[in-house]
Amino acid sequence: MSAEPDFDVIVVGAGVAGCITAYQLAGRGLSVALIDRGETPGAKNLSGGVLYTHPLQQVFPDFLQTAPIERRISRNQICFLNQDSSVAIDYRDARLDRDGTAVSVLRGRLDPWLAERCEDAGVLVMPGVRVDSLLIEDGRVVGVVAGEDELRARVTVAADGVNSFLARDAGLRPAPQPHQLAVGVKAVVQLPSDIIEARFGVDALEGAAIAVVGDCTRGVGGGGFIYTNQGSISVGVVLRLDDLTAKGLRSTEVFDGFLDHPYTERLLRGGELLEYGCHLVAEGGQAMVGELVHHGLVIVGDAAGMTINTGLTVRGMDLAAGAAIAAAVGVAEAIETGDVTAAGLAGYPKALAAGFVGQDLQTYARAPKFLENPRMYESYGPLLADALHQVFGLDGSARKPLRRVAMDALKGSGIGVGTIVKDAWQGARAL
Ligand SMILES: Cc1cc2nc3c(=O)[nH]c(=O)nc-3n(C[C@H](O)[C@H](O)[C@H](O)COP(=O)(O)OP(=O)(O)OC[C@H]3O[C@@H](n4cnc5c(N)ncnc54)[C@H](O)[C@@H]3O)c2cc1C
């Protein structure tokens, strides 16, 4: 017979997924412990920083007013970057600003705020504690082991991020494949807010998010990002691990190249480096999401491989929040009925599949494969710039009609029309 549990629920990891699961369960009257290895929650967490807020607004109706938001993102750019040129699509929309659809955040501020909300809701927050393994008895997860201590719970929530050693060490999840992982390198560069607003063409409190493809990764599958905070810029690259290894490049040298590129240098000029960090990113999309429940255990957020990278948007935090909402439903039901087996916890995967997380993972299931296409990183940026150069680069030679301009640029790129049509079709299906 197992010893009495210390808590109804133990949540491991005080990132977005863990905090929101813990907060929701405490709100349902359950006793919850939230454990994180960081001295303060979020101390080691790293995101590019654009957070799509709707699930956060669902959990905290005052999120936009009270959370430590940097800027409301009302301007989005997609930029093809080449050695000497760039071609961008620029989308700005007052609706994005008004609704607070997406905001920039710094995890060092957001995560402690989330953990504080948990404490206010009655969660026992335990920072500075590293969980070493799951406590498993008769094939059932009954808690966690941290150093000398064993802590028992009816249900344990693995919200321990992309590496999720907990579930893996227990043999409950396979290790991710190299093509399902990317390495993210990010810096935060301090700049006065008036300079940020002038350089990025935004008003006070408004922000811009630039997704960059091409020369920022030196041909490695992945992309770059530049996001505005209140008094700083978040800048980084996300590089597919298998491609990075195959090309014999180091992530930091690729990132340094992006920082030194005139396009980036102009935006960051005069800034002071505040932070620099590397972190793995789950890139496998739906194919990476394995089983979400086991006896006494649920897995949420990055630990379950829940991210969507379409090249246009990188999403993980909103999916972590959405999964947390679904997990709280399943865990609360299971505890209420006294059945914490995988079958008893099935309300979680069911709620997840019915909500935006399951639906979006399904919609973008083809995105990872499409983004493996090297032409996205090597060919289309120069092709666009060459075509536009023939339009704008007036040099006294006779002009050609647009049809000829396009054909010449195509010929120069070495990409056949059939290939472009195929890529466009695959892109339309994947994204
Ligand atoms: C460079 C980069 C850019 C990104 N850009 C974006 C973006 O712009 N927008 C977006 O939505 N997403 C982005 N993502 C993805 C996003 O950061 C993740 O999807 C998100 O952080 C997942 O949240 P999580 O709570 O599941 O995991 P995490 O935030 O990783 O939290 C896991 C927590 O578990 C704790 N932990 C781990 N192991 C243990 C242990 N053994 N014991 C105790 N505690 C433990 C950690 O300290 C951490 O606090 C980006 C990621 C990277 C790396």
Image: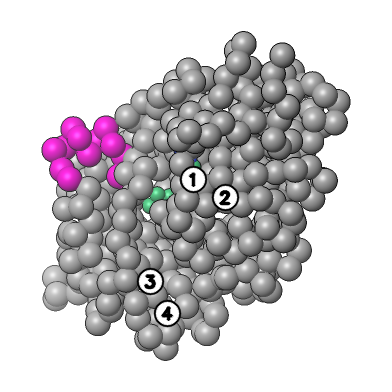
Q: Residue at x 31, y 56 (%)?
A: 277
Left or right of residue 312, residue 362 in this image: right
Q: Which residues are magenta?
A: 238-250
Q: Is residue 243 magenta?
A: yes
Amino acid tagged 2: Met
Instruction: Give whichever of 79, 222 is nearer the camera.
Output: 222
Which residue is outermost to the top? 138
Cβ of mark 1 under 8 A from ligand 1: yes
Mark 2–mark 1 contact, CB under 8 Å? yes
Mark closest to the chain's N terminus, 2 or 3: 2
What is the x, y in percent for residue 147?
45, 35
Question: How many neighbours does mark 1 have within 10 angstroms: few (below 14), some (14-19), or many (20 or more)?
Answer: some
Residue 126 bears which disc, if any? 2
What is the x, y in percent for residue 45?
44, 53
Residue 231 bears which disc, if any? 4
Cβ of mark 4 under 8 A from ligand 1: no
Left or right of residue 324, residue 41 in this image: left
Residue 129 bears which disc, if any? 1
Question: How many neighbours does mark 4 have within 10 angstroms: few (below 14), some (14-19), or many (20 or more)?
Answer: some
Amino acid tagged 1: Val
Mark closest to the chain's N terminus, 4 or 1: 1
Amino acid tagged 3: Ile
Instruction: Give whichever of 114, 308 is nearer the camera.
Output: 114
Q: Where 346 falls versus 215 (above or below)?
A: above
What whole-number distance in Å separates the C-alpha atoms at marks 3 and 4?
7 Å
Mark closest to the chain's N terminus, 3 or 1: 1
